[in-house]
Amino acid sequence: MEPLSGHPEWRSDTTAGSTHADVYTRARIARTGLLALNRDETIYYFAATDHDGKPLTETCTYEITGKPLPGQWWALTLYANDMFLARNDDDANNVGSSDMVAAPDGSWTVRVAATREGAANWLSTRNSSAFLVNIRLYQPDKAVQEGKVPELPVIHRIACAAQSSS
Amino acid sequence: MKRYLVPLLLAIVVAVATHAAVIEAIPVMLMRGAMSRMLSHGSSNQWLAAKRVTAQSRTVIRPSPELAYSACVYDLSQGPVHMRVQAMNDYWSLSLFEANSDNFYIADNRTASGGVDIWLLGDRPANGPPPAGVMIVRSPSDRGIGLIRRHATNAAQWPQIEAARREDRCESVQ
């Protein structure tokens, strides 16, 4: 999958769940998102890199900034490199339209790091290794169903832990 | 040189055919694996209600912590299966996936605000018509997965989810 135009960190497979998907797409979706819904119902966006193209990693701290997405509801979920939720007890693997703390204009910021540090919105990276952020946009607006790419959030790398030398 | 041409072409044809067969088989194999994992928690033609998704959940990749999932591995080899899904005020959907992972049917809170009541049919015909108000849906394969997703953002919503689940049906039509 190619990065989306204007959103270098995000990729999306609009044929997910579609009966029109070719055999390669069907094989890839089955491997990475079995039982995915089709684009009329849900659109999935994935980021494995930050806005500058660097891989997302537990050793760094990030901020995701964005605005409400055009659909009935949406959520950002962080997955570890095995495609499951990271094995930690932080209860901070998901934040979305129902619980996001946003500014009066609707904009929001999510801290993506191993510790919360008082952030209003937080996704924990603890035990996630090289992680993935997934946006689910449920019942997207008609224009998005028909192929328009909405204004997606931006993933900024803030800092990384110093590499230990051996 | 000529004597190598036929074996070479044959090898290329076999390689291409094998590659195509493997690619085609991947979704089928993964669906089979998913059905097998689900059936380790119950039997076919019944809803299997998943617990709330946590960091320990490992049944299906990339689970959503905001959704309550119920799955039914349907088997139409003995006849139709009756599926009923209780509506809720918040988001819910029923999606049906055939054996090759294609999502061939979906209903949700927008398209079926009163819930879903269907007979799912495969190759084997039903003995009679469904009761009034029950719609017929044809599955391209005899086996597949029905999946209910219900929006549940926190533990306080789970009693409502459990109440709705008690009204759901996935059962062979006798």
Image (tube, rainbow, N blue to C red):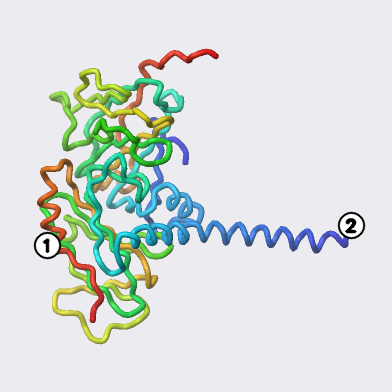
Residue A6 screen position, x and y as percent? 39, 30
Q: Earlier in the sequence, mark 2 or mark 1?
A: 2
Query: In the depicted view, which residue is nearer to us: B79 or B112?
Result: B79
* Residue under pointer 2: B1
Q: Residue A12, can we see it?
A: yes
Q: Position of residue B4 (x, y in %)?
A: 85, 59
Residue A162 location, x and y as percent? 44, 13
| Residue B80 vertical position relative to residue B22 in the rendered view, above or below | below
Q: Which amino acid type is marked by label 2?
A: Met
Say whether residue B123 is left or right of residue A72: right
**Where the C terminus of chain A falls, by quadrant?**
top right
Q: Residue at x 74, y 63 (%)?
A: B10
Residue underneath mark 1:
B114
Callouts 2 and 1 close, C-beta under 8 Å: no
Judge whether B30 appears above or below A4 on screen.
below
Real-space CA distance between mark 2 and mark 1, rounded to the nearest whole angstrom: 72 Å
| Nearest to the observer: residue B74 or residue A17 | B74
Q: Give whichever of A69, A77 is nearer the camera.
A: A77
The chain that hosts pointer 2 is B
Return the residue found at the far bottom: B127
Q: Secondary structure at mark 1?
A: loop
Amino acid at dot 1: Gly
Name the residue rendered at 20%, 80% in the picture.
B130
Instruction: Tell me the element at label 2.
Output: loop
